[in-house]
Amino acid sequence: MSDDGGLWLLAAGPVGATALYWALYRYYRNTDKSHAFERETTVEAKPVTGSDTKIDTVTGTRETRISGDNVHDYRTRVQRDDG
C-alpha cells in the first residue's frame, strides 16, 4: 500500500463513525421535527370557577397511626389463586 493511498482509509474510520453517530442521533431524536409546545400552542385563560368552602381543619397529629394501615399484617391484602 502506498503512502498516499492509505491515508484516506485511516481518515474514513473516524469520519464514518461521526457520520453514523450523527445519522442515528437525528433519526432517534427528531430534533428538526419536534413540536415546540411553548411557541406553537395557544392556551386561552378562562376565569377560575369553584368555591372556597372550608371542609376540615387539621392542626397537628391527631392519631399516631393511619386507620387501615397494614404495617403488621402486610400480607393480608395479597390474594393468591390456588387454581
Image (cartoon, helix red, strand yellow):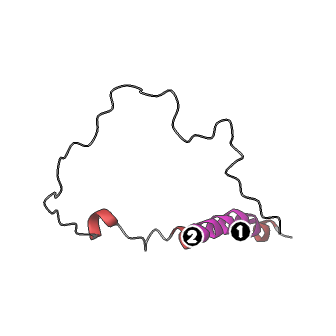
Q: Give the mark toward the camera: 1 or 2.
A: 2
Residue that badge 2 annotates: 28
Which residue shows up at 59% across the image and 71% down it?
Answer: 23
Image quadrant holding the C terminus, namely: bottom right
Three-letter code for the amino acid on which mark 2 is drawn: Tyr
Residue that badge 1 annotates: 12
**Magenta span covers which residues?**
7-25
Above or below residue 60? Residue 48 is below
Percent x, y of residue 66: 51, 36
Q: Secondary structure at mark 1?
A: helix
Which residue shows up at 43% across the image and 74% down it?
Answer: 33
Percent x, y of residue 77: 67, 51
Q: Is residue 4 left or right of residue 67?
A: right
Cα distance in 3D space between marks 1 and 2: 24 Å
Image quadrant holding the N terminus, namely: bottom right
Three-letter code for the amino acid on which mark 1 is drawn: Ala
Q: Is residue 58 left or right of residue 69?
A: left
Q: Is residue 16 magenta?
A: yes
Q: Secondary structure at mark 2?
A: helix
